[in-house]
Image (spheres, helix red, strand yellow):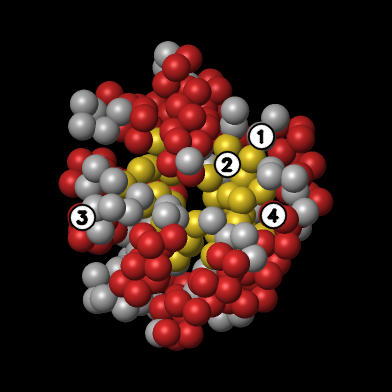
């Protein structure tokens, strides 16, 4: 089974993706399921509209799409209420973006959203790679504060902060690396050969529409690792995390 850990549906600043294009790409590449998050505008501002878009898409997909919920933590109790509304519409995970939403991972602002995710049994996707707030090491510290939650390090710090991704993974055992953008012969292989990380801590992601999904999948299928490790990266690990 191949599961794409993160795509964004809807319009963005430089790219957009709709359900028809996404499902056509999944069919062409043999991707069985994908976790879908709202686009950039909806993540930052129109949380309700974005959540409605992805939960409707998931409900109509026959199980192929799984919806992330978003809520800007600056909204406080209203943000938590929006997550509850999205959960009632079928959302099954939380996506946050400190750069788009304008908060520091460690200042406590996002904690009510994380408490909701913990109680709901959701994993938490956090996009990284944009300083000063959306980078791997603060995320690892946050993950250590919330040991009962599972965190996915979106983009694994790509690109300037790849160097911090492995130390972050070693620091927080409940943190998983996203494979998007990462070359297998350097970044991914460093993760896989590290005895404190290993291929079991990596989850496949295309991060569409910002990448070429064909290339993202080929990077994992071309990677010379044992078949069992490849199966875990492509979907086995994430399937377990999602239950």
Q: Please report contact status of discs 1 and 2: CB closer than 8 Å, yes or no.
A: yes
The label on residue 58 is 4
Q: Mark 3 sits on what residue? A: 144
SS assignment at label 2: strand
Distance from Cα at disc 4 to Cα at disc 1: 15 Å
Q: Earlier in the sequence, mark 1 or mark 2?
A: 2
Q: Is residue 41 left or right of residue 106?
A: right
Q: Mark 2 sits on what residue? A: 4
Image position, residue 20 (x, y; %):
81, 51
Within 10 Å of the Cα at label 4, are there few (<14), some (14-19), or many (20+) other Cα atoms?
Answer: many
Q: Earlier in the sequence, mark 1 or mark 3?
A: 1
Image position, residue 137 (x, y; %):
24, 55
SS assignment at label 4: helix
Q: Is residue 195 left or right of residue 51?
A: left
Q: Is residue 164 left or right of residue 34?
A: left
Q: Earlier in the sequence, mark 3 or mark 4?
A: 4
Q: Mark 1 sits on what residue? A: 31
Instruction: From the image, state whether disc 4 or disc 1 is nearer to you.
Output: 4
Foreground of the two, 143 or 97: 143
Distance from Cα at disc 2 to Cα at disc 3: 25 Å
């Amino acid at each position: 089974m191949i599961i794409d850990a993160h795509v964004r549906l809807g319009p963005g600043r430089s790219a957009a993706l709709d359900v028809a294009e996404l499902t056509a790409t999944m069919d062409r590449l043999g991707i069985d399921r994908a976790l879908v998050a709202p686009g950039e505008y909806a993540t930052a501002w129109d949380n309700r509209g974005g959540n409605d878009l992805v939960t409707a898409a998931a409900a109509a997909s026959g199980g192929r799409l799984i919806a992330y919920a978003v809520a800007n933590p600056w909204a406080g109790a209203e943000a938590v209420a929006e997550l509850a509304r999205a959960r009632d519409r079928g959302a099954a995970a939380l996506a946050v973006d400190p750069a788009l939403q304008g908060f520091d991972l460690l200042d406590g602002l996002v904690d009510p959203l994380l408490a909701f995710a913990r109680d709901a049994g959701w994993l938490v996707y956090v996009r990284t790679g944009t300083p000063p707030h959306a980078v791997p090491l603060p995320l690892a510290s946050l993950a250590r504060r919330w040991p009962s939650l599972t965190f996915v390090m979106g983009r694994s710090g790509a690109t300037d902060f790849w160097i911090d991704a492995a130390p972050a993974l070693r620091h927080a055992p409940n943190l998983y690396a996203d494979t998007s953008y990462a070359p297998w012969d350097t970044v991914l292989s460093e993760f896989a050969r590290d005895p404190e990380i290993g291929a079991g801590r990596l989850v496949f992601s295309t991060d569409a529409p910002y990448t070429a999904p064909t290339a993202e999948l080929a990077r994992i299928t071309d990677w010379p690792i044992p078949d069992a490790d490849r199966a875990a990266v492509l979907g086995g690990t994430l399937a377990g995390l999602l239950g």
